[in-house]
Image (spheres, grey):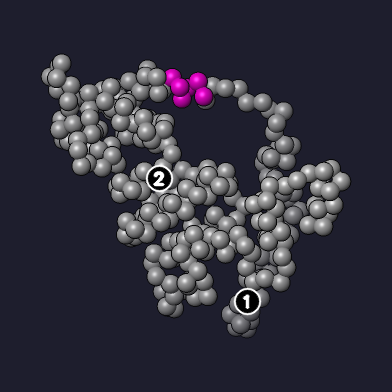
């Protein structure tokens, strides 16, 4: 921090007050937790049980909902910028799920992260927290784009969200052969079941699909890639380092269970 302050003074750089305060608070020594950890604990509502063990099948610890939030906090507080989260709401009530997803949204917007999350029938309040929707069905990409435009796309196909109906429930049922007919509102032609494959083709030919394709087809400037970003060999670590790491791991395991190995040897 002293070196950073010196360079800022020499180059006449005035840092943003919020970032400067965060950096100085992060560099304070002698603390049990960093400011980033304390912030995540408060956002996830885990500050009330921060001194409680997580627990196991044999040891009582935090509750099931708190354990889910602990797992989420472990990933967010680290250096990771991309998270893949599948069915994190299993076993949680809608309020806890909303709190976790809201925390993840703050992580995405404030720390410039990327999260791909799959949820089973989220509540309307939780659904509204998402920026983009990736709608997959029967192996087809039915829609991918901003959350605000998904209803407009299905209205172009002749399906409309009825009043007092959640968008997430509507998306799950609009591709079903049994439930699709109730959403048909196009009076100009009689209803006929539209399979998922035709919906996917309609998306590719729509302005939403063309906009997505134009975004993905932008060539990437390879000169911006750092040489250390990707490994150029099969293993990023030399074989000698791998051998030493594996040997150290086995030695540690044997040391922890020395009684068992001595007993079996005798």
User: Helix, strand, or loop for circle 1?
Assistant: helix
Q: Residue at x 22, y 27 (%)?
A: 159
First reached walking from the N terminus: tag 2 or tag 1: 2
Instruction: Name the residue tied to disc 2.
Output: 129
Segment tinted magenta in the rendering: 210-215
Instruction: Name the residue tied to disc 1.
Output: 256
Q: Residue furthest right?
A: 10
Task: Please give left or right for residue 214 compared with residue 21 in the image.
Answer: left
Residue 22 inside the magenta-drawn segment = no
Q: Position of residue 87 (x, y in %)?
A: 38, 51
Q: Quadrant of residue 174?
A: top left
Q: Position of residue 250 (x, y in %)?
A: 65, 66
Q: Residue at x 70, y 53 (%)?
A: 20
Q: Residue at x 49, y 44 (%)?
A: 115
Using the rendered image of the protein, determine whether residue 214 is visible from the camera's viewpoint: yes
Reply above or below: 59 against 215. Answer: below
Mark 1 packing: few (<14 Cα in 10 Å), some, or many (20+)?
few
Seen from the viewer's position, the closer of residues 53 and 162 is 162
Main secondary structure of the magenta stretch? helix
Seen from the viewer's position, the closer of residues 266 and 252 is 252
User: Helix, strand, or loop for circle 2?
Assistant: loop
Reply above or below: 264 against 192. Answer: below
Q: Quadrant of residue 156?
A: top left
**Label at residue 204:** none
Q: Position of residue 24 (x, y in %)?
A: 71, 59
Task: Assess whether mark 1 and mark 2 are in contact (beta carbons under 8 angstroms).
Answer: no
Task: Please tell me whether mark 2 or mark 1 is closer to you in this view.
Answer: 2
Seen from the viewer's position, the closer of residues 140 and 47 is 47
């Amino acid at each position: 921090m002293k070196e950073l302050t010196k360079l800022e003074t020499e180059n006449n750089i005035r840092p943003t007050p919020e970032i400067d305060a965060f950096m100085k608070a992060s560099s304070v020594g002698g603390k049990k937790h960093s400011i980033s950890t304390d912030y995540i604990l408060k956002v996830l509502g885990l500050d009330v049980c921060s001194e409680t063990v997580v627990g196991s099948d044999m040891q009582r610890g935090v509750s099931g909902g708190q354990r889910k939030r602990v797992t989420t906090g472990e990933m967010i507080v680290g250096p990771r910028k991309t998270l893949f989260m599948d069915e994190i709401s299993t076993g949680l009530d809608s309020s806890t799920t909303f709190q976790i997803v809201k925390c993840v949204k703050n992580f995405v917007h404030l720390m410039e992260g990327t999260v791909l999350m799959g949820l089973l029938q989220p509540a309307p309040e939780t659904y509204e927290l998402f920026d983009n929707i990736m709608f997959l069905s029967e192996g087809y990409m039915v829609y991918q784009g901003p959350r605000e435009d998904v209803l407009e796309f299905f209205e172009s196909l002749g399906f409309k969200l009825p009043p007092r109906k959640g968008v997430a429930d509507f998306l799950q049922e609009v591709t079903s052969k049994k439930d699709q007919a109730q959403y048909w509102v196009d009076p100009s032609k009689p209803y006929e079941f539209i399979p998922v494959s035709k919906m996917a083709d309609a998306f590719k030919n729509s302005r939403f699909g063309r906009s997505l394709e134009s975004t993905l087809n932008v060539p990437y400037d390879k000169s911006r890639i750092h040489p250390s970003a990707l490994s150029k060999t099969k293993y990023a670590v030399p074989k000698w380092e791998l051998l030493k790491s594996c040997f150290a791991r086995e030695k540690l395991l044997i040391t922890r269970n020395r009684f068992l190995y001595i007993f079996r040897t005798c």
